[in-house]
Image (tube, rainbow, N blue to C red):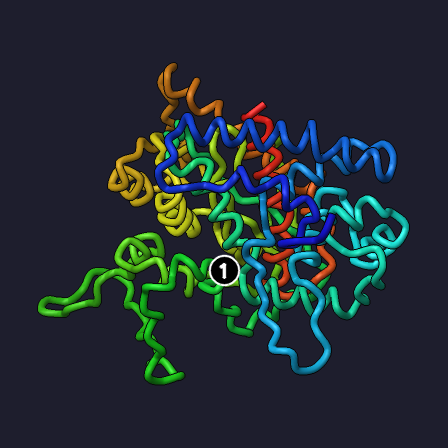
Amino acid sequence: MGVAGGHFWHDWRVETLITPAMTNDSIACRTMDRWNVVQHELIPELEARWGAMTPKLERVIHILEWVRIEEFTAVSWCGVGRPPFERAWLANAFVAKAVLGMTTTVGLIERLMIDRALRRICGFPLHKALPSEATFSRAFDEFAGGSLGQRVHESLIKEHLGDQLIGHLNRDGTAIEARERPARNGKAAEKGAATTQPTLLATEESPAAPTSTLAPPALARKRGRPRRGEARPAAKASPIERQRGQTLAQMLHEIPTACDRGTKCNAQGYKNSWTGYKLHLDTADCGVPISALLSSASMHDSLAAIPLSLISAERVTNLYDLMDAAYCSTELRAHSKSLGHVPLIDHNPRRGEKIEFSPAEAIRYNERSAAERSNARLKDEFGGRNIRVKGHTKVMAHLMFGLLALSADQLMRLRR
């Protein structure tokens, strides 16, 4: 059985291709056929060759079959120099690393050396030596620079949930601790968050660069009432108001991405501080992450609401937007309604009287627990707590491999 497309079970995958003429029933049948083929043909074949498969390895097989990351890692070789290792095999290995909960690439290589079944599942031939740690590192850098995880995740969501009606979309941010020094207070925040969603920004123009690096000094605002005939400048618009007049590319460009210190209240109301980043997720009520953004830890959750909503709106159709009190804003409610959604945002009294949900809205708002479960599963099961890379781009790539595994696992639970 030869290796093809990164998987050595390529022959079983011929009948699982998608065509534009497929209906919902045909897609459901295709999904069940894929499950039956893997469960009743592929896994017994593997067990006959290498013995009984552990539940974790069976989980890796199913997730790789759902994700199909090898379709996005095609690399051409012109025959000059040493041929590179197949990038599909390395991409499969990084997905398996997230599924198996491995913390380091060295541990992944050691597991591949002693586990023949995992080695063949990822696509590496047994008669060749495994790539070195440096090769894994270079491949990961290529995947991070090319936003491989984001592209695969977008395709996965559109394929399985793009034609479905999502009831509730839960929006939340979670702390991501990193092993790097925070940026200095006087240093400008790192830009370039627009590279995390290249497929969405392919047709948009990048924001214009400023003409000068030095901005004119702001005049001090005088206290008290203005004099007769004195004209004072209008009040500065809030960041959310400014976002409503920007394109998605401009909003992503302004999102700070440098590592710094952040503080956030947990579910019990206590404040926790950390050094690193903050991951913003839109999660469907079925537990599948729809879109993701990574920002500096100090950025407020509300500044990621509008970009996330625009990204999610291009992938799925939902009815309700569920957000906690950190997103309590008149502008965010108006933006949600402009998309045809019903905003359910917990009211922040801000030293006033709290406005409670109606009984029906309170029941719907309880669906927001799906966001907490997704954040917890990403950190506990798919490597969200074990960040060993530095820099916004690589940290996002590491998290996206975990989000791919989490999304595929949740989709499999829905199809069973």
Q: Residue at x 35, y 85 (%)?
A: 212
Establish if 260 lies above or below 373: below
Establish if 286 lies above or below 102: above
- The residue under label 1 is 196
The amino acid type found where label 1 is placed reads: Thr
Where residue 236 sits, quadrant-wise, is bottom left
Q: Nearer the viewer, residue 73 or 287?
A: 73
Say which element carries label 1: helix
Q: Say if residue 269 shows up in the picture.
A: no
Q: Residue at x 77, y 70 (%)?
A: 134
Q: Residue at x 65, y 67 (%)?
A: 141
From the viewer's perspective, tell me whether residue 109 is left or right of residue 68.
right
- Outermost residue, right side: 114
Where residue 322 sits, quadrant-wise, is top left
Where residue 61 sits, quadrant-wise, is top right
Q: Say if residue 343 shows up in the picture.
A: yes
